[in-house]
């Protein structure tokens, strides 16, 4: 099974192994961290939420500068250093006993995590040829989901014991997996650093790239499926449908298993920017259809009927998710200025962070309060963003040299 999750031997496999390794630790951390900080350390849920919000906000702002650092110093070394720094930050959580200490460590942790994503993407662009980047990214996504699922089981064991020692073991595992990922990344080929910006040339070119900024914003809208899955659907299932509560877990399992099994196959359909635009348009239709189906799950239906409708919506949603990811991976790499992949991937990733940060509040107000109408509005928003991707890619192509065979 593991061999099927990993690409053939080479740099892509090293990147996938590194992703799988630290995803296992992350899965354990995500499951039990909040309860550790509230039940063991004694922080309030509000303090934990505030600390993480501040941390991820700073991490988002740091993505572009750290991505630029990866370009200038070489992405392999920067990725290794940030993976090791993340491990240290996770270990430091064990020393936290107050909110100020938690805030400091959380900020270091999130900044390192966001910078690591940018550096790792720049490393991928440097060690994998352009034709293979989307497929390599698909393997990384597939292995990440598998790793998080395994880690979640480990974290669940820590939750069951509900002791300080059990939680700290989960944290230690997370720190160890980041160190292991650093060792794996260190074995990848070295990517040369790019030259310093010339006189009169802006250092952070991506901040002046308006077409790329528009595409990042459109992707942020489409990435609202993330808080939809993790925040809105659980609230919807429990409060607005007759389905049993365990359907929340079933919907998560459907999503995780589908991405592990089929993400690479979906990505194989994308070979250039034109193909990326087509599959993003299709993803908008699937996400719209998923929202329509979810809207029909409410009401006084029998439990099994509501469960079937929710499962059908989850299948449509994950299909749209995989198409969207495959298309925008190709777009984010293909339209980045050569030699600037670090800062471009850092900027693109910041849009995803915005969706994760603002999405829960916005979608809760839209869907939970708005009901079926809210679902339809959200589906329309997904479709509109997907359809707008084509003109935005065409605009971006006109502003930079892209091979003519990739015309949209």
Image (cartoon, rainbow, N blue to C red):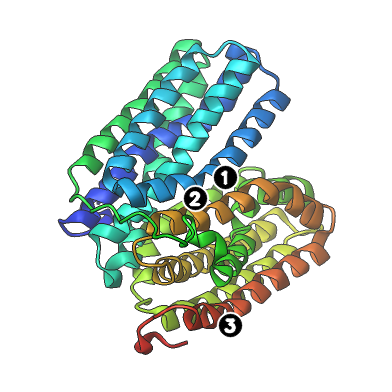
Q: Could you say whether the residue bearing mark 2 is in a helix, strand or loop?
A: helix
Q: Does the residue at mark 3 contact the one at mark 1 (Cβ under 8 Å)?
A: no
Q: Which residue is mark 1?
A: 61
Identity of the residue drawn at 51% across and 77% down: 396
Residue 187 left/right relative to 92:
left
Q: Could you say whether the residue bearing mark 3 is in a helix, strand or loop?
A: helix
Q: Is residue 35 visible?
A: no
Q: CA distance from mark 1 to mark 2?
A: 7 Å
Which x, y percent locates residue 155? 46, 28
Badge 1: few (under 14), some or many (20 or more) residues near its Cα, within 10 Å? Answer: some
Q: Does the residue at mark 1 contact the one at mark 2 (Cβ under 8 Å)?
A: yes
Q: Which residue is mark 2?
A: 64
Badge 2: few (under 14), some or many (20 or more) residues near its Cα, within 10 Å? Answer: many
Q: Earlier in the sequence, mark 3 or mark 1?
A: 1
The image quadrant that residue 126 belongs to is bottom left
Q: Could you say whether the residue bearing mark 1 is in a helix, strand or loop?
A: helix
Which x, y percent locates residue 2? 24, 49
- Looking at this view, is 260 or 180 the one in front? 180
Identity of the residue drawn at 33% across and 45% down: 19
Q: Which residue is mark 3?
A: 391
Which x, y percent locates residue 256? 46, 52
Dot in front, 3 or 1: 1
Vertical side of 229 occupied by 91: above or below: above
């Amino acid at each position: 099974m593991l061999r099927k999750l990993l690409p053939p031997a080479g740099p892509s496999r090293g990147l996938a192994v590194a992703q799988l390794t630290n995803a296992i630790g992350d899965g354990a951390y995500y499951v039990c961290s909040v309860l550790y900080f509230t039940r063991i350390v004694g922080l309030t849920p509000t303090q934990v939420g505030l600390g993480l919000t501040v941390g991820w906000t700073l991490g988002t702002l740091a993505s572009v500068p750290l991505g630029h650092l990866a370009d200038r110093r070489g992405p392999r070394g920067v990725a290794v250093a940030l993976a090791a720094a993340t491990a240290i930050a996770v270990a430091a959580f064990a020393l936290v006993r107050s909110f100020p200490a938690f805030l400091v460590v959380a900020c270091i942790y999130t900044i390192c995590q966001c910078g690591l994503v940018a550096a790792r993407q720049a490393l991928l662009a440097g060690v994998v040829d352009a034709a293979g980047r989307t497929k390599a990214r698909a393997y990384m996504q597939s292995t990440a989901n598998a790793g998080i699922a395994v880690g979640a089981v480990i974290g669940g064991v820590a939750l069951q014991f509900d002791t300080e020692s059990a939680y700290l073991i989960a944290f230690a595992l997370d720190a160890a997996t980041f160190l292991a990922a650093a060792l794996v990344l260190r074995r990848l080929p070295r990517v040369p650093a790019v030259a310093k910006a010339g006189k009169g040339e802006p250092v952070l070119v991506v901040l002046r790239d308006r077409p790329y900024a528009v595409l990042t914003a459109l992707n942020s809208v489409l990435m609202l499926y993330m808080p939809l899955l993790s925040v809105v659907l659980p609230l919807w299932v429990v409060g607005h449908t007759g389905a049993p509560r365990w359907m929340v877990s079933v919907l998560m399992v459907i999503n995780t298993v589908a991405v592990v099994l089929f993400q690479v196959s979906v990505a194989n359909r994308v070979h250039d920017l034109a193909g990326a635009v087509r599959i993003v348009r299709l993803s908008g239709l699937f996400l719209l259809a998923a929202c329509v189906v979810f809207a029909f799950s409410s009401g006084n239906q029998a439990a099994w009927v509501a469960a079937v409708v929710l499962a059908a919506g989850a299948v449509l949603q994950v299909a749209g998710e995989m198409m969207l990811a495959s298309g925008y991976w190709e777009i984010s790499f293909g339209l980045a200025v050569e030699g600037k992949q670090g800062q471009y991937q850092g900027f693109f990733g910041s849009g995803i962070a915005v969706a994760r940060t603002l999405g829960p509040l916005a979608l809760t107000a839209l869907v939970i309060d708005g009901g079926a109408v809210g679902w339809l509005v959200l589906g329309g928003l997904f479709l509109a963003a997907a359809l707008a991707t084509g003109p935005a890619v065409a605009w971006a192509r006109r502003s930079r040299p892209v091979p003519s065979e990739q015309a949209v």
